[in-house]
Image (cartoon, grey):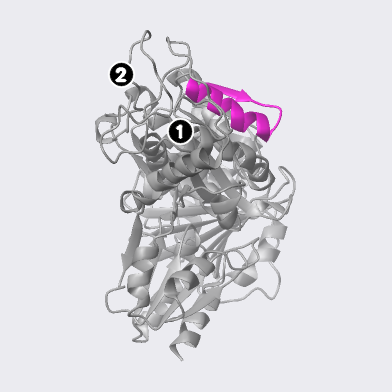
Amino acid sequence: MNADPRGVLTGSHFLDGDHAAAEGALAAGANFSAGYPITPSTEVVERLAGRFPFTGGTFIQMEDELAASIAIQGAVWGGSKALTVTSGPGFSLMMEHLGYGIMTETPFVLVDVQRGGPSTGLPTMPAQADMMQARWGSHGDYEIIALAPSSPQECFNLMIRAFNLSEKYRTPVLLMMDECVGHMLERVVIPSPEKIQIEPRRYTRKGPDEQYWPYSLEECNNGDLVPPLTKVGEGHFPHITGLTHDDRGYPAMNAKSQAVLLGRLVDKIRNNADDIITIEEDGTDDADVIVVSYGITARVCQPAISRARAEGHKVGFLRLVTVWPFPEKRIRELAGRVSAFVVPEMNLGQIVREVERCSQGRPKVRGVTHAGGAVHDPEEIYNAIREVMG
Amino acid sequence: MTRAEIKIAGFGGQGVIMAGIIVGKAASIFDRFHATMIQAFGPEARGSACSTQVVVDQAPIAYPYIQRPSILVAFNQEAYELFEPQLRDDGLLLYEEDMVTLRPNQRASLQTFGVPATRIAEEVGRAMVQNVVMVGFFTAFCDFLSYESVQKAVLDSIPPATKDMNLAALKRGYDHGRMVRAGDGVGVKV
């Protein structure tokens, strides 16, 4: 399906990542956002609030992040495409409702423009320290999809991708920005609507008089684990609960139902990891050392890589566009043939643990940590590359 | 040179960020370059230090940060004091001459040129367009930026009702730049 032209601001623009993310949401067809604005994510909802009146959408400023993150889910069950946007402390507050969205299979996009933490931390300064919270922040077992843009253009592109994945797999998707990408301005090219592919929401084909069960796979093809939605208020009366439930949506609190439901929730992501995961590689084929990075840090490490390459070292670059699910298959393959991974990130060591896990002790894994508040000095990353080169 | 690294700094409220947006937009939307702009983003809105870094390059810009700017546009004394030491030895310093007094022992290797941007802005209408005067002045030294693309970027960035005042501010700043540059021939290419 092509994008609805009403939301698409076709042309070349000089935008920051926050504004570009808002345009991505509009292009994806988002027509509802509830938010509790917080630095450095405020510009996203500021732009949505200004643009929605022209595209037919609604923005509500809520009393807090809990309200924002549940209001969007009500909107989705009413037929809207919805997102909320937050940072740091707000992301923590939204964790309960992120879990609710996963459990009830409610598609929406949650944007976290990362700033320094814990707690209120550094409101105006960058970090990439919510990456493990993105993975495990809500209680219970689940799989999550999280994307990490490195430029304003990618904030636009990945916002559309986030909505598409959320519809395809009927699950919340996280767009993990950082303050640098959010506040950096760069050219953003917005294509014409017919060049933007939108994953349509899959609705039940059942009429109002037929029995619709919100978690039944009867309308799914073999192997497809994603049941279709309905619009509340148009004939069906689904029961939606965060409790462990059966196909009908009714509470079924026993070990068997739990195993069936969680198994499906996890498998619908794991079985489709190849479809969900996007990574970017450069010079990894014959690399001795590969720098694994994401977000703004994937750009900050470039001078270090260029310098090491200019000195004759074989340094590859791998950028996680999809951070969750983690591209473990590819990292394992590469782990068999490189001597080391260098993992710079603006935190005290998060994604580096995943790289270590997939490396299984074969190549050296060297994190390059930063407590946040500023990006790395490329020199630190260069020094780490030289150090693992021995 | 294949990469211009521009630092623009002054008080919050002087239009420093808007000046950066106009330059970045002119280069990357209305001209053929790539540009990135990073804002020093603080909790204060007006009256405190404010700066932006704009990188302009012929190639896509992987690293958007500036360690040693090639051009500093200083709107006030604090900006000059703070960022002049970062300028490369062959750098270009452009400054608001009524707001900035150069140190007597100023590095001789720098090219330095001043403009009374606030006075000019007041003459064309209001002091608030001083940033557009500065952008015009800056444009006169940037061989890589055409006046036309900067003009388009200004028009794309301001409320339509202030069009005449802003265009006059840009022209006056540019003309002043052409005039003071004439003797030296200093300019920046990308």
The x, y position of residue A322, in whole percent, is 41, 53
**A62 vs A264, nearest the viewer:** A264
- Visible residue check, residue A33: no
Do the numbered discs 1 and 2 sit on residues whose CB atoms are within 8 Å? no
Magenta region, main secondary structure: helix
Q: Residue at the spot x=28%, y=79% of the render?
A: A286
Q: Identify the subunit bearing mark 1.
A: A
Vertical arrangement, residue A307 with respect to residue A132, above or below? below
The residue segment tinted magenta is: A58-77
Is residue A294 covered in magenta?
Answer: no
Residue flagged by tag 1: what amino acid is it?
Pro
Can you identify the residue that label 1 sits on?
A: A107
Can you identify the residue that label 2 sits on?
A: A205
Mark 1 or mark 2: whose residue is earlier in sequence: 1
Q: Which mark is residue A154?
A: none
Q: Is residue A207 left or right of residue A171?
A: left
How packed is label 1: few (under 14 Cα within 10 Å), some, or many (20 or more)?
many
* Disc 1, SS: loop
Vertical arrangement, residue B93 with respect to residue B130, above or below? below
The x, y position of residue A117, in whole percent, is 69, 55
Callouts 1 and 2 on one subunit? yes
Residue flagged by tag 2: what amino acid is it?
Arg
* Disc 2, SS: loop
Q: Identify the subunit bearing mark 2.
A: A
The x, y position of residue B25, in whole percent, is 43, 45
The x, y position of residue A340, in whole percent, is 43, 81
- Check the picture and name the quadrant holding the N terminus of chain B: bottom left
Q: Is residue A68 left or right of residue A217?
A: right
